[in-house]
Amino acid sequence: MAAPLAESDSESLLAAMKRLEERIARIEEHLGLAVAGSPAVPPPAVNAEEAEENLEVQLGQNWFAKVGIAVLTLGVIFLLTFPYEALPPVVPSLIGYVLVGVLIAASRGLHRTYQQVSRYLLGAALLLLYFTTLRLAHFSPEVAIGNPAVEVALLLLVVAINLGVAERRKSPYLAGLNLALGYFTALAATEPYTVFCIIAAMSGASVVFRMRNGWHGLTLLGAVLAYPVHLLWALNDPVFGNAMHLVTAPEINLAFILLTAVILGAGSMERGGQDETVEVIGAALNGGGAYSLMFFLTLAAFPAHFVLWHLLCSVTLLGLSIAYWIRRQSKYITFVYSMLGYTALSAAIVAQFPMPEFFVWLCWQSILVLSMAVWFRSRFIVVGNFVIYLIVFIAYLVTAGTVSAVSISFGIVALLSARVMKWQQDRLELKTEMMRNAYLLSALFVIPYALYHTVPPGFVSLSWLCAAATYYLVSRLLHNNRKYRWMALLTTVLTILYVVFVDLVGVNPVFRVITFLVLGSALLVISMMYSRRKARSVATKPSSDTAGDGA
């Protein structure tokens, strides 16, 4: 017979079983096998001493390595920028290339034991390789290479080699660093077309890296760098010591801005698992950067062709919005590019037509905006378009001085907009009639206001009656549409008030007689129409007796 367990042994056994049970529970929870209702095992508490030690390791091992190598690299770069007048121009670069070889050898030697330090050394070597090559043509009164074309070719060769290393190592950080160096190389070029082609090539490389490796941040980097580099070229490249002034040739540089926008815009055309918020930010940076640069250069350097370039910019940005809608059905990215496209089109209209005539063209532009909003199913554009429509109309009233017959366009546009929204109500997924009613209400006041200011005083009430008759006719054509009937009724009421308070004492007696005769006849016709309509509805409605007999 076994001896009974001692009390200490029993406690040890219970503690061991408890630990075993906790381990099994954690394994089940990790594998998704935890039984419902079983008590959850809390994760092991992190020891304060352990947390402090981890922070110390992170700081000492990772951050000190990064900062240390960055400081060393900057020190070597500063060393290379000294003039060294006593030495031949090529000697500092030769020393730099030797240091690059040393850093690469050290990176390879430390790859197995200190991987993080090895990666940082490699990045420093690639950066130093670029600045060593740049040293051949800069930072000294006498340079080793005096031909800018050769210098740019060597720098691009270095960038290409470094990007190849980044692709081989699958390092987005190395790729981003060397893309930035590639954009910087464009500033070293003196020939304009070389500058534009380098910017386009680096933008294309960022797109290729994104599509091949899913490095989404590189297209953001491209949008952040491409347009400022182009702007620096347009300011005569002050980075390399040139006097700042606006470069006015060649004008074709504006086309390269649009080309860059298309290249970077195409980078996110295919969905790649990235958070759409980041991609919307990228679209705003790309489209906003392109249009801001286009606006500045056309306004400051090429005002004679302002309208042409803004029309081309509008077509480009609207084309990107359409492409995004077809390929990805992305409402937000589509919204960003389309609104920038409409802004470019508005700027072209304002520049082309005198004030206040351009307000009328802006009003008609809203039909295009609303039609595309229906296609994009964008309620944001619909609401924004209506707000802009009201702002344009108010600005027209404030600045026009005298309201002309073309102001009726605002009422016609409001009616057409309401009709477009009615036709495509399901496509827009609008749950209420609020926006349509807003457009109809605008037309209800805009058209009488425009007629009041454009027709002779004796014909104002008659013109309002014609407007009411038109509403009645549209109502009949649209199968007795109730909204247009109400518009006709309210316009008729407005006409009655105008006749009583204005025409009764303020117009020629002849016009007064004609107005009263026409208005009275119109009111009788309207009354008869409603009486006939009511009689018809009563005749078609089954009586209670007939309903009882049928039952």
Image (cartoon, helix red, strand yellow):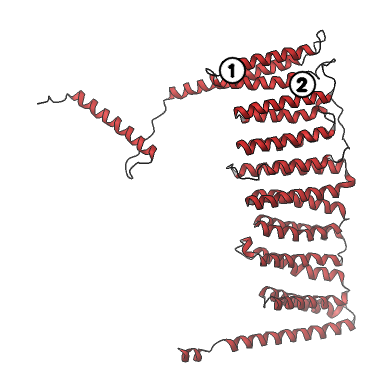
Q: Residue at x 80, y 77 (%)?
A: 466
- On screen, 48 above or below 140? below
Residue in the foreground of this view, choosing between 395 and 413: 413
Identify the element where label 2 is drawn.
helix
The answer to which quarter of the image holds residue 220 is top right
Amino acid type assigned to the residue bearing label 1 in the image: Arg
Return the x and y of residue 343 as percentages of the image width and height: 77, 50
Residue 134: mark in rendering: 2
Return the x and y of residue 4 as percentages of the image width and height: 13, 26
- On screen, 471 above or below 63? below
Question: For the view shown, which residue lies furthest in the left direction?
Answer: 1
Residue 108: mark in rendering: 1
Residue 386 visible in the picture: no
Residue in the foreground of this view, choosing between 513 and 450: 450
N-terminal of the pair, mark 1 or mark 2, is 1
Q: From the image, which quarter does the N terminus lie in?
A: top left
Residue 76 visible in the picture: yes
Return the x and y of residue 318 as percentages of the image width and height: 74, 51
